[in-house]
Image (spheres, helix red, strand yellow):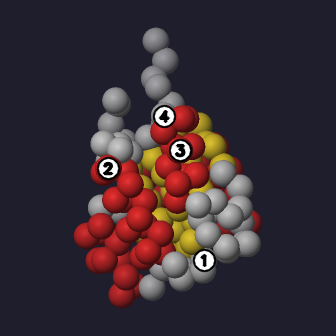
Amino acid sequence: MSEKRIRVLVAKPGLDGHDVGAKVVAHALRDAGMEVIYTGLHQTVEQILATALQEDVDVIGLSILSGAHLPIAGKLMAMLRAEKADDIMVVVGGNIPRRDHEKLLAMGVSGIFPTSTRFEGIADFIKERVKDR
């Protein structure tokens, strides 16, 4: 019997048009054995949530370079709670200043991965924390 593969939604919220990093992370997570869905650019939080629920993902990975990580993550976490879907793990990567890490964690974000994070570190973090549902 094969194990259920971890399903990850990699999302690019807002007006940030730089997605090379998100695509590279998506490939690295696939190489690590995960099933990855990539949303493409300019997604709203509502679109990200709808895709996450439709695809029954275990993890939502937000790639944010625009500096809007606090309002975007806050809105997503509130919407996940409202949908009773807060069992979906949320991680955030990109240009995330150290001063905002505690704020993101207090919102319920599980992991923060600044732009220089090694891909293996991201994959290992997800594998260690995702539980079979």
For the residue marked with disc 3, what is the amino acid?
A: Ala
Q: Is residue 2 above or below residue 85?
A: above
Badge 3 marks a residue whose secondary structure is: helix
Q: Earlier in the sequence, mark 4 or mark 1?
A: 4
Badge number at residue 82: 2
Q: Earlier in the sequence, mark 3 or mark 1?
A: 3
Q: Quadrant of the C terminus?
A: top left
* Residue at 25%, 70% in the rendered image: 106
Query: Mark 3 sits on what residue?
Result: 50
* Residue at 35%, 44% in the rendered image: 83
Mark 4 and mark 2 residues within 8 Å of each other at the beta carbon: no
Between marks 3 and 4, how big is the CA–CA gap? 10 Å
Q: Earlier in the sequence, mark 4 or mark 2?
A: 4
Residue 92 % position (x, y): 47, 65
Mark 3 or mark 4, which is nearer to you? 3
Q: Is residue 28 above or below residue 66?
A: above
Between marks 4 and 1, how big is the CA–CA gap? 26 Å
Q: Quadrant of residue 64?
A: bottom right
Residue 59 % position (x, y): 45, 47
For the residue marked with disc 2, what is the amino acid?
A: Ala
Q: Earlier in the sequence, mark 3 or mark 4?
A: 3
Q: Earlier in the sequence, mark 1 or mark 2?
A: 1
For the residue marked with disc 4, what is the amino acid?
A: Asp
* Residue at 30%, 61% in the rendered image: 108
66 relative position to 57: left or right: right
Q: How crowded is the residue under tag 2: few (<14 C-alpha within 10 Å), some, or many (20+)?
A: few
Residue 113 % position (x, y): 47, 69
Mark 3 and mark 4 residues within 8 Å of each other at the beta carbon: no
Query: Mark 1 sits on what residue?
Result: 65
Query: Mark 4 sits on what residue?
Result: 56
